[in-house]
Structure formats: C-alpha cells, structure tokens
Image (cartoon, rainbow, N blue to C red):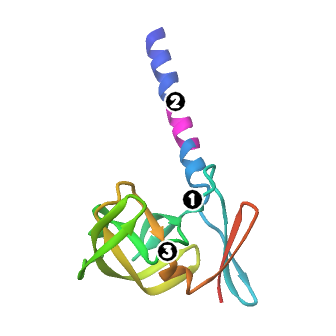
Amino acid sequence: MSILAWVMSIGLLVLVFDDELTKQFNPNEAPESRFTQSGVEVVLKQNRQGHYVTTGKINGKEVVFLIDTGATEVSVPADLADELGLRGGRSVRLRTANGTVTGYDTQIGELSIGNLTVYNVDGHINPGMRNQAILLGMSVLRELEFTQRGDTLIIRQL
C-alpha cells in the first residue's frame, strides 16, 4: 500500500511539473486580445529563454508559434502540414540555423493569434524541423505592427 502511495505521489508530481515546464516554454497559451480605437492588439510575454512563444491557429487548428523576425516566411514542420490542410508546392532551398534543406512553398489560408487574423500568408513546409513549434516569420509580421518593451511584445493589427 505504501509503494502504491509513493508511485501515485511521484505521478502527481510529474504531472504538476510537466504543466509548469509547458507554461515556462509557452507563457502565452491563451493570448488575450485587446480592442483599441486603432484595431486589435495581442500582448505576449517572453519565456524563460527570452523567446516569444504563443498558441494560435492555422486554418482553425491550434498550433504553437515561435515569433521569429529573422524568418522570411512562416515555417511549418513537415509532419504538421497535412493536419493543418497545407499542400506543398514547388520545392525551394531553405537556409536555416541548422543548414540548408529542401522545403516546399505553401499558402496558409488563415492564421490567427487571439482575435488577430491574417489571410493568404506565404509559408513553406520544412522537413528539417524536428519540433512542433511553427516559426512565425515576416510574411505575417509585415502585415502587422509590433513593439517590444522589456519582456513584452505587443502585436497590433491596424
């Protein structure tokens, strides 16, 4: 009986700490939108590594975005593409932090973070990406206005 209690206690601790680690990676799991006179804005907090990570949607499916101002387009891991309804077009050479890979152009019909939504966004499907976070690059960010102060990023759709 005491062994069972220890096993259950350890299991509970694993669940609690796993949830805490997830919040540390993505402190913006439920990004809130604010409506201002000039439009919609979403406020994001940095994670422990100094990155802006948030939950959003592509074509109505929930995803995790890593904001990357150094990325030209939205970069989607290949293993997520079918699930998100993305079709690969012509092949392209992608220069990434991990080297050059062959990816495929794609068009994202709808991409949203909170109540901020953009349509018909250029992206690519990247078979070299090993994690599940989608890089949110300049093909989206150039449609928006963004300001960073301290550990906060404010994204506005005017």
Q: CA distance from mark 2 to mark 3?
A: 38 Å
Q: Is residue 28 left or right of residue 87?
A: right
Check residue 15 for magenta coloring: yes
Disc 2 versus disc 1: nearer the observer: 1
Query: Residue lying farthest top?
Result: 2
The count of marks equals 3
| Place of residue 130 in the rendered image (x, y in percent of width and height, measured from the top left) | 35, 54
Mark 3 lies on a secondary structure that is loop
Estimate how packed mark 2 is, as few (under 14), some (14 to 19) or many (20 or more) residues with alpha carbons within 10 Å.
Answer: few
Q: Which residues are magenta?
A: 13-20
How far across and how far down the image is residue 56, in percent? 50, 68
Q: Residue at x 34, y 75 (%)?
A: 124
Q: Amino acid at mark 3?
A: Gly
Classified by dominant secondary structure, the portion drawn in magenta counts as helix
Mark nearest the camera among 3 and 1 is: 3
Residue 128 visible to an observer of this rendering: yes
Does label 2 or label 1 sit earlier along the sequence?
2
Q: Residue at x 50, y 23 (%)?
A: 10
Up the image or down, 112 lies above or below 29; here it is below
Residue flagged by tag 1: what amino acid is it?
Glu
| Label 1 residue SS | loop
| Numbered disc in front, either 2 or 3 | 3
Q: Work out whether mark 2 precedes mark 3 in sequence or the reverse, and give the earlier one.
A: 2
Which one is earlier in the sequence, the residue at label 3 or at label 1? 1
Please name the residue that numbered disc 3 is placed on. Answer: 137
> Nearest the camera: 68 or 13?
68
> Picture coordinates of residue 114 (x, y %)?
58, 73
In this figure, which residue is indicated by the disc labeled 2?
Answer: 12
- Identify the residue position indicated by label 1 in the image: 29
Q: Residue at x 38, y 58 (%)?
A: 98
